[in-house]
Image: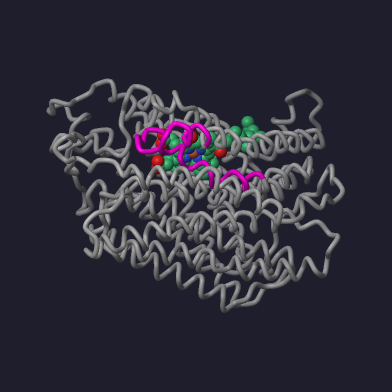
Amino acid sequence: MQISKSLKRLIFWELGVPITLLTIGIYHGLMQTIYRAGVIHQSSFAHLDYYQGLTLHGVINAIVLTSFFAVAFGHATIAFYFKAEPNKKVAWLSFWLMTIGTCMAAWAMLAGKASVLYTFYPPLKAHPLFYLGAALLLVGSWVPLFDWANMYMKWKKENPLVKTPLGVLGTLVNFTIWFVCTLAVAYEVLVLLLPWAMGWKQTVNVTLARTLFWFFGHALVYFWLLPAYIMYYTMLPKLAGGKLFSDLAGRISLFLFLLFSVPVGVHHQFSDPSITKGVKMFQGLLTFGVAIPSFITAFTLAASLEYAGKKRGSKSLFGYFARLPYLDPNKYLFAYMICGLFLFIFGGLTGIVNASGPLNAVIHNTAWLPGHFHMTVAGPVFLSIIGMSLFLYAGISGKRIFLPKLNVIIPYLWVIGILIFSTGLSWGGLIGEPRRTNLGMTYLNPKNELFTPEWVPTTLLALAGGIIMTVAAILFFVVFFGTLFGKKKEEAVLSFPVSEILHDEKRIALFDTFKPWLIIMGIIIVLSYVPAFINANNNPGPGAPAFTPENPMPVQPVSETR
Ligand code: HAS
C-alpha cells in the first residue's frame, strides 16, 4: 500500500536513529569481550570506563533499539492491516518524547554520570537526567497504543465477525503488556530514584526498587520478543514457500503471553533474601507457564516449515530442512528469521535452566546469564529487528538492497559468532566466572593475586565470538547505510509477505477479545505481586557494602554497613 510522506518520514527516523546509535552499542559489546579476556588491564579505554561502556551497551541495544523498533513496526503493522494510517500528531509526539528521553539519558551516560547499567539498581546512583530520560523514552513508546486501540475498536465495529489479523493482535497484546509493566518502573523512577538522586531523600529501599524493576524487567523481554513472533507467525511460512500450520495456535500463544509475561519477575530475585520462599515458588511455577507459548510456537513453526519443505519437493522425514531458501538474496528476511529461531532453541533451554530454583543458585550472576540472553535478545530479537528494519526501509523508500548477496550471509555469520561467544560465557558461568566484572583488572590479570587461569579459555572463546559478531554487525551497517544512501529504483510501498493459513480454524470469540484475558491477567498479577511488594516493604534488607569499579571485592565487609 502507499503511505503518506509524514508516516514514511516517521518510520525512517524511528529506524534510523536507533540503528545509528547501535554503532556505539556494538563497539561497547566488543570492548566488553576485550576487557574480560584480559587483553587490557585498564579500567577505561578511549576516555570511557568499563561500566560506562557496559551501560551504553545495555541501554542502547536492549532499551533504545528495541523500543524505537517496536513502535515503528507497530505503526507499519497497524497501517498495513487496517489500510488506514495512525494519527500522525500522536505518532510524532511519541517519537519526540522517545528522542528527547534518549538524548537526556545519552548525555548522562556519555558524561560518565550514569554508569548504573541497564537495570539501574540502587545503591548505584545516576544523574537525575538519566532517570527522567528513561521515563520519557518509556512513556513515549506506549503513547501510540491508545491510538491503535482506538483504530482497533473502530475496525471491530465495522467487522464484528472477522478474526482480528494476527499481526494486529500481536501488536496490541505486546503494547498492553508494555503499558502494564512500565507502570511499575515509572513508580520506581519517579517515586524512589529521582527524589533520591535529587538529594531530597537520603536512602532508598533497595529491595523494593529491585522488585519494581523486575515487575517491568521480565515483561520487557517479551516486549522485545513479540515483534519477532509476529514476523514468525505472519511472514516466515510465506517466505519459506508454505503456509502457517495453525492460526489458532498463534492466538493462544499471544494470549498466554498476556497472562504470564508480567507475574514472573521474581525469578530474577531467587537469591534476594527479602522475598519469601512461597512467593519465589509461585512465580517460579508461573515462569514455566510463560515458556508454554514458546513451546507452542516452536511446534507450530516446525510444522509450517515442514509443510513448506514438502511443497518444495522434500520426501523424507527431516529432508524438508534441506529444502528451505536459506541463501536466497531475494528472501533475505527468511535467513534473518531462521537464524534467530535456531539460536532461540538454546536461548529457551538455558532460560528453563535459569527458572529452576536449585539450578538458578549455580548460575545466578555468573557469565552464564549473558550467555543465555545473547541467544534470546541478541538472537531472534536482534536478527528480526535488523532484518525487518532493512526490509521496511527498502520497501517504503523504493530503494534496492545494497550488496544483496553479502546481506543474506550476515545472519549466518552472526549465528556463528553468538554460538562461540555464548559457549564461552556459559562454560565460564558454570565454573564460576562472574558477569558484569572487568576481569582484566583482576581475575584475568596474571600479575594480580586474584588471577584465575581456568577462565582464560572461556573468556578467549567469548572474545573470538565477539570479534565475529562485530564483523557481522559492520557488514550489516555497510548494507543498511549503503541502501539508505542508494538511489530510488522501485515503487515505494509498505508491504509485508503475508502467510496463508493451512488450518484456518473458525473464529472462536474467546480468542478474539481482550476482556477476559485482561481480567485474568490482573488477577494473576495481584496474586503474585501483592505478597512480593509486602515482602519488599517489610524487609528492606541491610545496606550494601562499598565497592570500587576497579575491584570485584567489597572495600568494607557487609557487617560494617548494617
Ligand atoms: Fe530469560 C534472565 C528465564 C526467555 C532475556 N533473560 C534473563 C536476562 C535477560 C533475559 C536479558 O528464570 C538477564 C537479566 C539481567 O540482566 O539480570 N528466560 C527465562 C525463561 C524464558 C526466557 C524461562 N529471556 C527470555 C527471552 C529473552 C530473555 C525471550 C529476551 C528476549 N531469564 C530467565 C531467568 C532469568 C533470566 C530465570 C534470571 C536468572 C538470574 O538468576 O538472574 C522462556 O521464555 C524461554 C522459552 C523458550 C523456549 C524455546 C522455544 C524455541 C523456539 C525455536 C524453535 C525453532 C524452530 C526452527 C522451529 C521454550 C520457538 C528450527 C530451525 C532450524 C534450522 C534447526
Q: Which residues are magenta?
A: 256-282
In the image, is residue 132 part of the stretch drawn in magenta? no
Residue 433 appears left or right of 142 = left
Q: Quadrant of residue 359?
A: top left
Identify the image quadrant of the N terminus.
Answer: bottom right
Residue 153 appears left or right of 279 = right
Identify the image quadrant of the C terminus.
Answer: top left
Asked if residue 2 shows in the view, the reply is: yes
On screen, residue 141 above or below 349:
below
Residue 172 appears left or right of 11 = right
Residue drawn at x 56%, y 75% is 90
Residue drawn at x 42%, y 46% is 534
Residue 486 appears left or right of 303 = left
* Number of numbered discs overlaid on the protein picture: 0
Residue drawn at x 32%, y 49% is 121
- In percent of width and height, residue 504 lies at 84, 46
In the image, is residue 261 part of the stretch drawn in magenta? yes
- In percent of width and height, residue 395 lies at 64, 63
Residue drawn at x 31%, y 50% is 205
Asked if residue 415 shows in the view, the reply is: no
- In percent of width and height, residue 74 lies at 61, 61
